[in-house]
Amino acid sequence: MLLDKNHIEQHNNRGAKLHALKLAPLLNELPQADALINRIAAFQVAIPSWALGTGGTRFGRFSGGGEPRNLEEKMADIALLHQLNRASGAISLHIPWDIPQDPAATKALAADYGLRFDAMNSNTFQDQPGQLHSYKFGSLQHADKAVRKQAIDHNIDVIQHGIALGSTSLTVWLSDGSCFPGQLNFRQAFQRTLESLQEIYAALPSNWKLFVEYKAFEPNFYSMTVGDWGQSLLFANKLGPQAYTLVDLGHHLPNANIEQIVALLLMEGKLAGFHFNDSKYGDDDLTVGSINPYQLFLIFNELVEGMNAKEMNHTKDLAWMIDASHNVKDPLEDLLQSVEAILIAYAQALLVDTDALKKAQQHNDVVVCQEILQTAYRTDVRPLVAEARLRNGGALEPLKLFRENNLRAGLIKTRGEKSVATGL
Ligand SMILES: [Mn+2]
């Protein structure tokens, strides 16, 4: 369900005067404001197909109503987000939750909406109905070769689905590991996983990337076979030039220095996938920037610095995706908040006076180093982000417009109170 363009125009006209007042000081103060706005306007974040419904925990799930009932409705939701913020122009599909029944039609629908297909996601962390072998004790690491083969074949099948849609990357997140000491031989688990990944890697088209996503714990609580960035990097290096590490912000132990991790992965040319969310304790999958926006800024600061050092394209060279769960908020409102937080942190990182920072670092002027970072972080860049959105044809205030037009009520009317989207 897309919004009538007139509604966006009227909303923008109503807020135009106040927006101009807020933007003017930034345009005066920042000589590079125009270039900044263009960079922000180019930034796109993919939305995963499992993020449009209400999320839950193992204790319960509380649907908010109007959830998309199929892939087409999920795409319609992302198209609506993209219409509002012009920064959500990609969808990341999960197989088998969202297998396109008619790939050509799915591809055509995406083109109509102006969406492209981001990374494909395989699933060997749960058993599907009718599945021959169980993943209870792992998939690519499994002691039984038949289980490993089933998991390898699934990943190759996901690549085939992706080729049909025009995707160019595969994300492999494994829940493989062990829950108790002695359950697993770590070296053998690693070797078997590597051999399995090598078979998947061999099935990649030459223009594809393989992202190896790591996670510190859960669902296995003693060891995870791809448990941190070092293990992921080992796999990626052993696999070859098309394999990369994927950083998910929620997949670290508490207080991990994620900004240092991304800096080093970029240095090695091995960072290519990135999942946004926020957390206080573990893999909480909360709205991006809702708990620790300063950390998000520090991470973006290293991302921008590291990408610039390698002359990378900010928009295209890393696969940016939101990977969060919406347990108590409207998923679409939550995603609008997340994208906004990402663009704000990106804009703040672009504001960092890198020349001055280099000088201060050279002279060990720790005070000035902190001042430079915090000056950027404490700048209210929201008018720049809004201006970027306006130039792209989006809404001045997407969340406000979503509510003004009762868009969730409209979705409930079409889809019902009790519709449930596939996902976690
Ligand atoms: Mn993730």
Image (spheres, grey):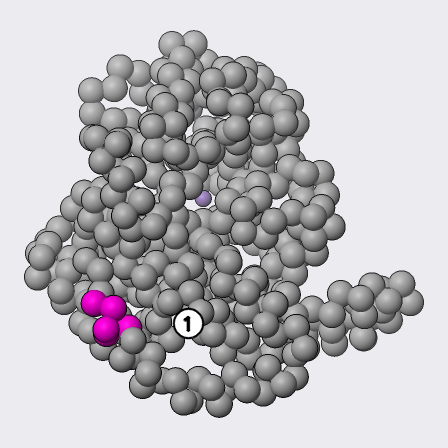
Residue, disc 1: 390
In this view of the protein, which residue sits in the foreground, 129 or 59?
129
| Residue at 35 percent of width and 53 percent of height | 325
Q: Main secondary structure of the magenta part?
A: helix
The percent position of residue 62, horizontal first and vertical second, equals: 20, 57
Mark 1 falls on what kind of element?
A: helix
Ligand 1: which quarter?
top left
The percent position of residue 412, horizontal first and vertical second, equals: 12, 61
| Residue at 36 percent of width and 23 percent of height | 160
In this view of the protein, which residue sits in the foreground, 95 or 249?
95
The quarter holding residue 54 reads: bottom left
Name the quadrant of the N terminus.
Answer: bottom left
- Whether residue 254 can be seen here: yes
Q: Amino acid at mark 1?
A: Leu
User: Against 389, is 53 above or below?
Assistant: above
| Residue at 67 percent of width and 42 percent of height | 265
Q: Is residue 7 magenta?
A: yes
- Whether residue 295 can be seen here: no
User: Against 153, is 4 above or below?
Assistant: below
In this view of the protein, which residue sits in the foreground, 157 or 220?
157
The percent position of residue 17, horizontal first and vertical second, equals: 41, 89
Q: Which residues are magenta?
A: 4-8
Query: How many other residues sit within 10 Å of disc 1, few (<14), some (14-19) or many (≥20)?
Result: many
User: Against 300, is 57 above or below?
Assistant: above
The quarter holding residue 365 reads: bottom right
> What is the residue that sits farthest to the top in this orientation?
145
> What is the residue that sits farthest to the right in this orientation?
363
Name the quadrant of the C terminus.
Answer: top left
| Residue 353 left/right relative to 80 | right
Q: Is residue 74 magenta?
A: no
The percent position of residue 142, horizontal first and vertical second, equals: 44, 18
| Residue at 20 percent of width and 30 percent of height | 101
